[in-house]
Image (cartoon, rainbow, N blue to C red):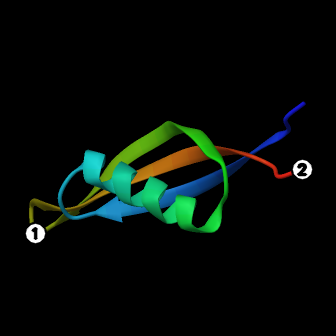
């Protein structure tokens, strides 16, 4: 039987939402073992001087706990 845990993280990118997601998952995988998936809970942008300065995502990452 497996037991999973969910942790919430925020990731940011100056390129795109996709890049923010990929960076967040890559970083989470360095710290958390057995990452199984993620749910993108929220997306938002940071605007500076009328242009998009950053893309941010809040995600819930699921990982399986080691036995």
Which part of the image, by quadrant, shows the N terminus? top right
**Position of 53 compared to 34: left or right?**
left
Name the residue: 81% across, 49% down.
65
Q: Quadrant of residue 48?
A: bottom left
Name the residue: 68% across, 52% down.
7
Residue that mark 2 sits on? 67
- At label 2, counting other C-alpha atoms closer than 10 Å, the crowd grade (few under 14, some 14-19, many 20 or more) is few
30 or 16: nearer the eye?
30
Q: Residue furthest left?
A: 50
Residue that mark 1 sits on? 49
Task: From the top left corner, tell me how far across and down residue 23 is, in percent.
Answer: 37, 60
Task: From the top left corner, tell me how far across and down residue 45 is, in percent.
Answer: 28, 53
Task: From the top left corner, tell me how far across and down residue 14 is, in percent.
Answer: 21, 64
Q: Helix or strand or loop: what does disc 2 sit on?
A: loop
**Position of 25 compared to 34: left or right?**
left
**Position of 22 compared to 53: left or right?**
right
């Amino acid at each position: 039987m497996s037991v999973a845990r969910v942790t919430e993280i925020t990731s940011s990118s100056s390129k795109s939402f996709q890049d923010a997601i990929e960076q967040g998952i890559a970083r989470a995988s360095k710290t958390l073992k057995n990452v199984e998936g993620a749910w993108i809970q929220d997306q938002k942008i940071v605007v500076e001087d009328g242009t998009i300065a950053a893309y941010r995502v809040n995600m819930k990452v699921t990982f399986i706990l080691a036995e």
